Image: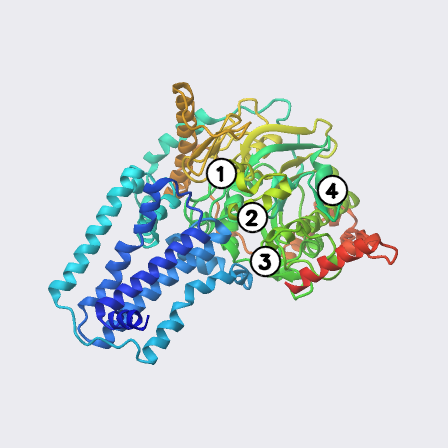
Amino acid sequence: MKKITKTILDAMSTRLGFVFTLLLLYWFKTMWAYTVDFNLDIQGFYQVFLAVINPIPLSLLLIGLAFYIKRTKLFYLLSFSIYVILFIWLISNSIYYREFTDFVTVNTMLASSKVSAGLGAAALELFRPWDIIYILDFPILAFLFLKKLVKLDHRPFNKRASFAVTSLSAMLFSANLFLAEIDRPELLTRGFSNYYVVRALGLPAFLGYSANQTYMANKERSKASEVDLKPVEEYIASHYAQPNPETFGLAKGRNVIYIHLESFQQFLIDYKLKVDGKEYEVTPFINSLYHSNETFAFANVFNQVKAGKTSDAETMIETGLFGLNQGSFMVNYGGTNTQQAAPFILSKNGYQSSAVFHGNAGSFWNRNTAYKQWGYHYFFDASYFTKQDDTNSFQYGLNDKIMLKDSIKYLEHMQQPFYTKFITVSNHYPYTTSLIGDEIGFPLAETQDETINGYFATANYLDASIKAFFDYLKASGLYENSIIVLYGDHYGISNSRNPTLAPLLDKNSETWSSYDNAMLQRVPYMVVIPGMDKGKVIETYGGEIDMLPTLEHLLGIDSKNFLQVGQDLLSPNHSQIVAFRSANYFVTPEYTSYSGRTYYTKTGEEITNPDESTKEQLDKIREAANLQLKISDSIQTGDLLRFYTGNDLGKVNPDDYSYNNSMKALKKIEKEKGDASTSLYSQKGNQSTVDLFKAPSYKELHPEQFSSSSSSEDSSSSSSSSSSSEKK
């Protein structure tokens, strides 16, 4: 054994041996990430072989650059520095993947400063105990060098040998690329998926691929012209779905109140959590809205976000266009591109004011500049609300009940009809830190994943917050003259956690599939129209991209003259083809394509050998879904709306909007309008309605859980929930 150890240490004491050691360590860490952190859907020996070899070529090429250095210390410094950079890139992707189920792109890195506000301690929640594997080699290497068990090699490589290593690396990468093209033809040109690139070529190659994609996207804008509008306008005209005459204008002239249900998935509707033999309805109030005859509730609406997540959802509901395939549209283009968004459209159709209420930093997702391009008159961010501390907020902002209560003093001064959006945050990952004190009490699920366990409790808190807000709307008189739209922005439980979630959904973790992941992309979409009695649960398949034209038609505004790629969900002509943001991912009532696999939507049965008729149908659906994404991308990345003259909206001037001193601005308008003021405050004879908002805590809503007469079982469950949450 000593002889083997000495042989290894002697080998590591040569320059070639040291580089080989770093290469081996990087390869091992990559294999660990592929196995533990990433879900690359590797199938068959060929893809396994590609995954095993792909870390080697570029890491050898990069670390091998040190062979050209003759000076001993500089050689070791350079080779180790390159290794550290490769390590940082690997661990960053591993951590990022746990939350976003995607890889870090150049766009993401360029935008990082604009999304960092408000993140704080959330990143620490993404670390896992087994991450020690990634850093274990550093102290070991330091020990070996400090104890001089591994010595420095002062013999430099000659140029020919150095070039031979570079050539070998290039040849290996070429071979890797060739083999990857056999597995997936046109891998780099058609942009199938980030997963495919990483699976076939590795993370260093993916970085180069992403950099090229970013460069090409920026180049798109610079070379775009009016000519590029022609295929876009042709698509919009052919894709347009006529409104349903029974619902067109049904909510004309009403206030619009959007309620953003953070990380809220469709499976929560009517869901009852079973703990200790008892059932707990997670979202009783939202369930009542879902089944109300005042509500158009959609059972098959899917989120269509990618890495931009919440910002992607906002982009779709406001502009009728998709977010980006890489990064966030709001971050990368939101402050510069010409846009025709809902607030601006409504301002040209009789709406007097618009605002967003959100208890987080205004710079998060670049909202404070993107909202101006969308035409929002006001943006009430964290600076307008109760000062945040450990008792009322967490890393993503002010808790919902407090944010909604604090919003009333601004909402009541807005001129009607208004267009507003309330962005909740308490049901946000990690679901273990937002509930405090008397809000703790809803039972935690009992799985091995704390994120899943807390998800139901924070959803219950969100539900209570929404009920309190609806109670206020009714008490203040705003309810009857409003249309309230509730939507889930994206998944709350990521695909990597779904197998752990499966038993709670009466599913088998062992047989969990990509089909199941696809079905869990459903999010609630509910349109509440007070006084209406035509409400029902609608089975139409659609996505967030369809929400804006649906709303426009309900308000009596025809969407045909706007560059929007969605369709009215209430239209009998809706295509029911839902394109996910990744190319070739889609769902229809008949077929689902997800993660490279195709299924029958109704049964979940995988289609492995489709007949010619089925192939033809799938090709048509795939072509339609990809074309929708392509048209949207051409508008977004080419900034084509700057050339558009197909309506009389004109262009937003962001300089017309300031989000400072908004209360002062609202009161000034009231004063100038005098008796003509339509604000709720004016209608109430200059009396505030703030006191009408009542939001009792969980403990106040469920005193039986905390009374001394409760069973010991209840007390134990409640105590356990409280203890678990407080530890986080």
Which mark sits nearer the N-terminus, 2 or 1? 2
Mark 1 belongs to which amino acid?
Answer: Ser
Q: Position of residue 111 (x, y in %)?
A: 43, 56
Q: Is residue 198 left or right of residue 314?
A: left
Residue located beneath label 3 in the image: 396
Q: Nearer the viewer, mark 4 or mark 1?
A: 1
Q: Nearer the viewer, mark 3 or mark 1?
A: 1
Which amino acid type is shown beneath numbered disc 2? Answer: Tyr
Q: Quadrant of residue 395?
A: bottom right
Q: Are marks 4 and 3 in contact (CB under 8 Å)?
A: no
- Answer left or right for 417 relative to 645: right
Q: Amino acid at mark 3?
A: Tyr
Q: CA distance from mark 2 to mark 1?
A: 39 Å
Q: Kindly identify which numbered label has been placed on residue 284.
A: 4
Residue closest to the far right: 709
- Of 11 and 481, the residue lying toward us: 11
Q: Does residue 580 appear in the picture of this structure?
A: yes
Task: Tell me which label, 2 or 3, sits earlier in the chain.
Answer: 2
Q: Amino acid at mark 4?
A: Pro
Can you identify the residue that label 2 sits on? 376
Q: Which residue is mark 1?
A: 514
